[in-house]
Image: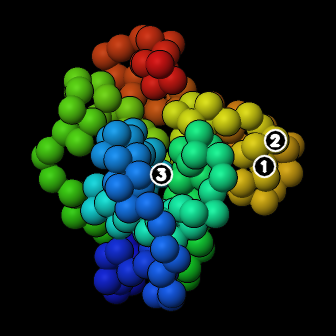
Amino acid sequence: ASGVTDGGAAYREASGEQVPCSEAEFTAYVQERRASLYATAYHLTGDRFEAEDLLQSALFSTYRAWDRISDKAAVGGYLRRTMTNLHISAWRRRKLNEYPTEELPETVGDTDAMRGTELRAVLWQALARLPELQRTMLVLRYYEGRTDPEIADILDISVGTVKSSIWRSLRRLREDEVLAFGRDQEECFGELVA
């Protein structure tokens, strides 16, 4: 269970001076790529409300820096890196408010946020059972297509730590009883990284 939080406050940045930018260009970019960016935010956070807050904070940061970004083709990478950094910062702050308990927290609900099969929901639940840092590494590797050195740079850890953590995470997913129930483990795992 976690301590008292105000939801998205972990991702909010201190307000500062607005840097003028081409609003129409930024708005068009966001409208075109919002679904993809939201998917990344959701995979990082595992919660639709936190994902929305994370994406909004990353978009705000990008909006302020829009005129300083000379290569507009690299905006997607800039946004994803911003989301990852904001998420890691919020995770580190929130980590102080979490403590182990014998009671399980309430579930989010019966909605299938992945809009897919029951297997996708089971896969996400298996990912959610991983420690946050391991889940972040898997999202960066398999959903973002990042290399080990890129992940190490983003998370400010060694490449060896990335490799061993991803290996342990995948082993843990392969051994997950709920994930393997009624299905071949290799088939389940193949759908995770597809």
Residue 178 relative to residue 155: left or right: left
Closer to the camera in the image, 144 or 107:
144
Residue 47: in sight, yes or no?
no
Colouring: rainbow
Residue type beneath disc 1? Ala
Q: How many marks?
A: 3
Upstream in the sequence, badge 3 or badge 1? 3
Q: Helix, strand, or loop for circle 2?
A: helix
Q: Report crowding for label 3: few under 14, some 14 to 19, many 20 or more residues within 10 A (C-alpha).
A: many
Secondary structure under the numbered disc 3 in the rendered image: helix
Q: Which residue extends farthest left? A: 110
| Residue 179 position (above or below residue 138) | above
Question: Horizontal placement of 130 versus 134: left or right?
Answer: left
In the picture, the quarter occupied by the N terminus is bottom left
Q: CA distance from mark 2 to mark 1?
A: 5 Å
Residue 157 coordinates in the image, percent (x, y): 81, 56
Q: Determine the secondary structure under disc 1.
A: helix
- Provide residue 160's location: percent of width, then percent of height: 86, 43
Q: Which residue is mark 3?
A: 44
Which residue lies under the disc numbered 2?
149
Query: Tag 1: Cα neighbours inside 10 Å, few (<14), some, or many (≥20)?
Result: some
Q: Residue at x 57, y 63 (%)?
A: 67
Q: In terms of depth relative to the viewer, which is nearer, 84 or 68?
A: 68
The image position of residue 194, as x and y in percent, is: 47, 19
Return the residue at label 1: 152
CB atoms at circles 2 and 1 under 8 Å apart?
yes
Indicate the amino acid at tag 3. Answer: Leu
**Viewer-nearest residue: 13 or 187:** 13
Residue at mark 3 to residue at mark 1: CA–CA distance: 16 Å
